[in-house]
Amino acid sequence: MIRILICDDQDVVREGLHAILRTAPNMNVVGVVGDGAAAIEATITFSPDIVLMDLNMPGMTGIQATRLIREKAPSVRVLALTTYDADEWVFDAIRAGAAGYLLKDTPRAGLIKAIEGTCAGQTFVDPAVAGKLFAQVARSSSPATTTIADALNAREREILKLIAKGMANPEIAARLYLSEGTVRNYVSSIFAKLDVNDRTQAAVIALRYGLAE
């Protein structure tokens, strides 16, 4: 059962998300809050698996709340859910530690799939903002890729490429005919060498430096 916390400052959005998710047999909404500060308190109180986080809220923004949740409860994954597809929101959410970025008009099936995938370690980015992400990555590409590439062995580069495609450890294990434990060890090594804390950050580096092709 996936434990979900909903954070949005609009009553109609909170109620709509709650209505959608309570119909999913493998999901349990453990809390519904209306601001960033309350989201942090509820995360500590209810220990959700995932937080659906609105980003543009008065007071403490969803970006700030996401960063603090990742600091205080690093095992909790945050899925940014917003009406905004502007570049600054995308990158701020990623830098704050969000595991994915979806727009609020995502269809029910897509929302449920994103929640399930995010909990399994995948990275979901709404198609409406994926183009902006790749465009920014392309603009910021640097010839310094060799330094990063040389730090990883061939198998680690192969696994990083699959992480950048949003694949979870079980999928990578099946694709490469490795055990899940072996994949976990490789992923830990990749994180250490890239100096990142999660798959989203690793994927962004892979994209930025051309290691996802």
Image: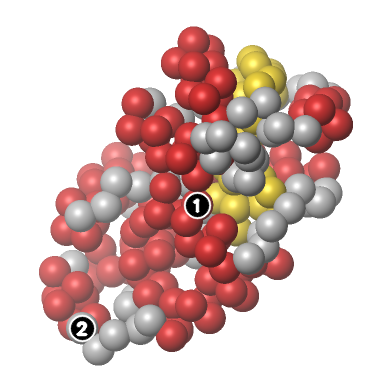
Q: Residue at x 36, y 42 (%)?
A: 180
Q: Which residue is mark 1?
A: 93
Residue 194 is labelled as none
Locate the N terminus by quadrant: top right
Cα distance, mark 2 to mark 1?
25 Å
Residue reaching furthest to the front: 59
Label 2 Cα neighbours within 10 Å, binned few <14 / some 14-19 / many ≥20: few
Classify 142 as above or below 59: below
Q: Amino acid at mark 1?
A: Ala
Q: Which residue is mark 2?
A: 144
In the image, 136: left or right of 188?
right
In the image, 1: left or right of 67?
right
Of the residues tagged 2 and 1, which is closer to the observer? 1
Classify 86 as above or below 38: below
Classify 93 as above or below 9: below
Classify 113 as above or below 144: above
Q: Residue at x 57, y 68 (%)?
A: 87
Q: Can residue 190 be seen in the rendering of this structure? A: yes
Residue 23 location, x and y as percent?
A: 83, 25
Q: Residue at x 63, y 46 (%)?
A: 56
Label 1 Cα neighbours within 10 Å, binned few <14 / some 14-19 / many ≥20: many
Q: Amino acid at mark 2?
A: Ala
Which quarter of the figure has residue 19? top right
In the image, 17: left or right of 119?
right
In the image, 201: left or right of 110?
left
Image coloring type: secondary structure
Residue 156 location, x and y as percent?
A: 25, 63
In this view, the residue in front, 27 or 92, is 92
